[in-house]
Image: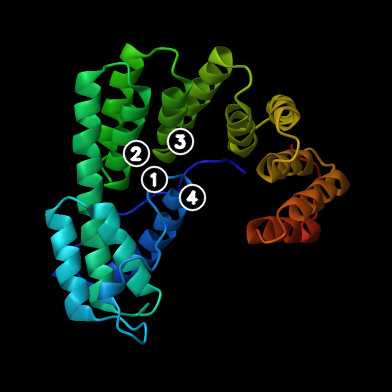
């Protein structure tokens, strides 16, 4: 399926509704895993043993003091590292969860601050624009995220990374036609951008007004993405959905089985295969 980040939630304070906080905390924990895989923050490790007793259990007084000290020193990544280590033991502790949310927001605010300083020093620093925009997006400030990306494009018109981020935001905001145009611009600037081809294919196939011709175009784009990265299970999944809508259910199922072989632990592929195997009907339109 399409390859972009999920929506995220703003950090919340202790005074807000507890049940809503718990839902947001759960998604933040998922988010932290996602961004850690992208190198945005480090994963937790047991490097700051002073917050843990000899038996390995959390010493809350020392933990709180240490987190406050690290945050005061602007070492938010180290503070996040420490809190996540504690949460490995105390997953249900509400205070730790709130501390995590607040520290993560401090971290993102600093990402904005330092990224903006880098941009001021060098208006052509593409990575800095992406860093600031990503932080704004995680803070749920889509307007400033988009503003940052558009400014980056003005100074770096050929920066495909920024064009891709804008396209993903357009999709997230429900403006799929704009997203399609942006992903096509990416492929014009860089014909080897496989993610852009895959995203175009996905959007064409998922459109409510999708026609037989649209599906053929989607198939062509999906095949381009796969040709560039033959072992990418996400691209194979997209192609499977397109063939299913074209009426070739057997090919669609075989493709999904291939995707599952490549990524056997991905439940979404298994669910997709189950849906295709139990859905009957005529070819799409």
Local crowd size for mark 3, using a 10 Å CA cut-off: few (<14), some (14–19), many (≥20): some
* Separation (CA) of disc 1 from disc 2: 10 Å
Dot 4: element: helix
Residue 157 position by quadrant: top left
* Separation (CA) of disc 1 from disc 4: 8 Å
Which residue shows up at 80% across the image and 58% down it? 277
* Residue 115 vs residue 206, the one in the foreground: 115
Local crowd size for mark 1, using a 10 Å CA cut-off: few (<14), some (14–19), many (≥20): some
Q: Are marks 1 and 4 in contact (CB under 8 Å)?
A: no
* Residue 118 vs residue 233, the one in the foreground: 118
Badge number at residue 40: 1
Residue 53 position by quadrant: bottom left
Residue 58 relative to residue 32: left or right: left
* Separation (CA) of disc 3 from disc 2: 15 Å
Q: Nearer the viewer, mark 1 or mark 3?
A: 1
* Separation (CA) of disc 1 from disc 3: 22 Å
Q: Earlier in the sequence, mark 2 or mark 4?
A: 4
* Residue 177 vs residue 37, the one in the foreground: 37
Residue position marked by numbered label 3 in the rendering: 171
Which residue shows up at 32% across the image and 13% down it? 154
Residue 179 placement (x, y as % from top left): 48, 28
Residue position marked by numbered label 2 in the rendering: 134
Residue 188 placement (x, y as % from top left): 57, 13
Which residue shows up at 20% across the image and 65% down it? 67
* Separation (CA) of disc 3 from disc 4: 22 Å
Q: Nearer the viewer, mark 3 or mark 2?
A: 2
Residue position marked by numbered label 4 in the rendering: 37
Q: Earlier in the sequence, mark 3 or mark 4?
A: 4
Dot 1: element: loop
Q: Note whether 247 is above or below 146 in the view shown.
A: below
Q: Are marks 1 and 2 in contact (CB under 8 Å)?
A: yes
Residue 65 placement (x, y as % from top left): 14, 70
């Amino acid at each position: 399926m399409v390859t972009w980040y999920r929506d995220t939630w703003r950090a919340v304070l202790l005074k807000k509704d507890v049940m809503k906080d718990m839902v947001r905390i759960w998604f933040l924990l998922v988010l932290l895993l996602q961004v850690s895989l992208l190198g945005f923050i480090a994963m937790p490790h047991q490097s700051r043993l002073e917050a843990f007793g000899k038996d390995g259990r959390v010493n809350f007084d020392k933990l709180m003091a240490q987190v406050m000290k690290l945050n005061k020193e602007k070492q938010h990544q180290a503070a996040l590292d420490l809190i996540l280590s504690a949460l490995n033991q105390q997953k249900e502790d509400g205070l730790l969860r709130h501390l995590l949310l607040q520290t993560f927001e401090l971290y993102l605010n600093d990402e904005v601050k330092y990224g903006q300083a880098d941009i001021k020093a060098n208006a052509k620093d593409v990575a800095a624009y992406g860093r600031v925009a990503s932080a704004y997006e995680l803070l749920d400030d889509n307007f400033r995220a988009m503003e940052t990306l558009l400014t980056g494009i003005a100074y770096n018109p050929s920066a495909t990374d920024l064009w891709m981020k804008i396209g993903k935001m357009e999709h997230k905001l429900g403006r799929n036609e704009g997203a399609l145009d942006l992903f096509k611009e990416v492929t014009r600037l860089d014909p080897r951008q496989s993610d852009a081809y895959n995203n175009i294919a996905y959007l064409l196939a998922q459109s409510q007004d999708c026609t037989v011709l649209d599906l053929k175009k989607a198939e062509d784009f999906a095949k381009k993405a796969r040709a560039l990265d033959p072992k990418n299970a996400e691209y194979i999944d997209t192609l499977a959905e397109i063939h299913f809508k074209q009426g070739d259910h057997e090919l669609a199922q075989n493709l999904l089985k291939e995707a599952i072989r490549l990524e056997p632990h991905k439940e979404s592929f298994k669910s997709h295969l189950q849906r295709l195997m139990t859905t009957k009907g005529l070819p799409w339109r």
